[in-house]
């Protein structure tokens, strides 16, 4: 047998022995499979590492049974933002039980939201061990339901330095359900209803489900990290103008929170032909990371 056979065999053995392999590589970033523990289950995800990392984010899911958000993660990684994205609890390769999917089930009760916040926090702790530069700021980026999960997570994990929230509520879970039941999936809702009408139903309609409401403002009131919310004005999942009103109240108290409203968009502010929301979030993350690093150098 020639020497090439032995060297190839040795390489193959080395590949088998490595527990976590880079399974993909582009000119911009590498992708590595990871597993981590949270509340007694093993969650599976991927870490995307750019050639030059300016910031790092963990992606937090919406309410659907979602696997890791690879396309969105790649978009961030191409811009120098390292990403850990994982299969939601009970979905894909992650253990545990996915709670849902029906609107109004225990999917958004306090117990499940807290459990999902533990998962996000465990992801942050895991991610930190993989980052070569320990001063790299880590933030959370999430969608929809993440509006309740991210503030809980950030209030308990001091490693989180910023947060970006796409179409995320700042109202309680019960208020959000009232609004969603009232709009009833009607994409033309805002052509036939006024803001005051929607607000009246959001505040006063009887609840179809009984559980303790989660109010994100409880956690947001404790936070001093920067936050960016991106809303679509035609959203029929969350009452955007009411959410913005809540944010303005928090801003008036000195919270470093910002938001951008897109007049033509609905609940989906991430995918589709319009890239502006994600573009804005990327530039915002880079700026906050730069500010964070300057602050750490000056200390």
Image (cartoon, rainbow, N blue to C red):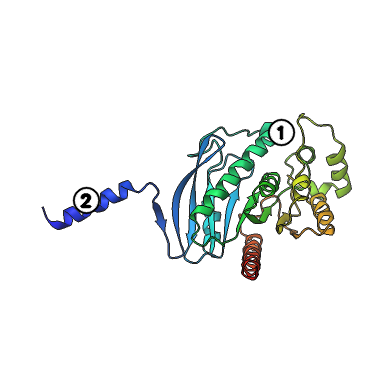
- Say which residue label 1 marks: 104
Q: Is residue 15 above or below residue 109?
A: below
In this rendering, which labeled residue sits more in front, label 2 or label 1?
2
Q: Nearer the viewer, residue 15 or 87?
A: 15
The residue drawn where x is 61% and y is 41% is 118
Disc 1 is placed on an element classified as: loop
Please give the residue where the numbered disc 2 appears in the rendered image. Answer: 9
- Return the disc, 2 or 1, that comes first in the chain's sequence: 2
Residue 13: x %, y % from top left: 26, 48
- Image point (70%, 50%), residue name: 267
Residue 182: x %, y % from top left: 80, 38
Q: Is residue 125 visible?
A: yes
Quadrant in which residue 99 is drawn: top right
Q: Which is nearer the eye, 215 or 72? A: 215
Left or right of 182, for residue 40? left
- In percent of width and height, residue 145 lies at 68, 44
Residue placed most toward the observer, 121 or 97:
121
């Amino acid at each position: 047998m020639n020497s090439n056979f032995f060297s190839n065999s040795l390489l193959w053995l080395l590949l088998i022995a490595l527990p976590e392999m880079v399974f993909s590589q582009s000119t911009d970033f590498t992708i590595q499979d990871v597993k981590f523990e949270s509340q007694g289950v093993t969650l599976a995800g991927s870490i995307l590492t750019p050639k030059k990392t300016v910031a790092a984010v963990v992606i937090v899911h919406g309410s659907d049974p979602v696997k890791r958000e690879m396309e969105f993660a790649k978009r961030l990684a191409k811009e120098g933002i390292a990403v850990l994205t994982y299969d939601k609890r009970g979905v894909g390769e992650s253990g545990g039980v996915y709670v849902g999917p029906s609107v109004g089930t225990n999917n958004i009760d306090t117990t499940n939201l807290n459990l999902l916040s533990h998962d996000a926090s465990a992801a942050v702790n895991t991610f930190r061990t993989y980052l070569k530069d320990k001063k790299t700021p880590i933030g959370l980026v999430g969608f929809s339901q993440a509006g309740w999960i991210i503030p809980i997570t950030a209030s308990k994990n001091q490693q989180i330095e910023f947060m970006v929230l796409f179409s995320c509520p700042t109202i309680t879970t019960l208020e959000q359900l009232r609004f969603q039941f009232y709009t009833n999936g009607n994409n033309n809702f805002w052509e036939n209803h006024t803001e005051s009408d929607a607000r009246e139903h959001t505040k006063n309609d009887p609840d179809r489900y009984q559980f303790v409401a989660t109010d994100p403002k409880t956690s947001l009131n404790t936070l001093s990290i920067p936050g960016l919310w991106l809303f679509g004005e035609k959203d029929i999942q969350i009452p955007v103008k009411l959410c913005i009103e809540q944010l303005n109240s928090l801003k008036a108290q000195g919270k470093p929170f910002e938001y951008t409203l897109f007049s033509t968009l609905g609940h989906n502010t991430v995918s589709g032909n319009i890239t502006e929301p994600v573009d804005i979030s990327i530039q915002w993350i880079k700026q906050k990371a730069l500010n964070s690093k300057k602050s750490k150098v000056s200390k």
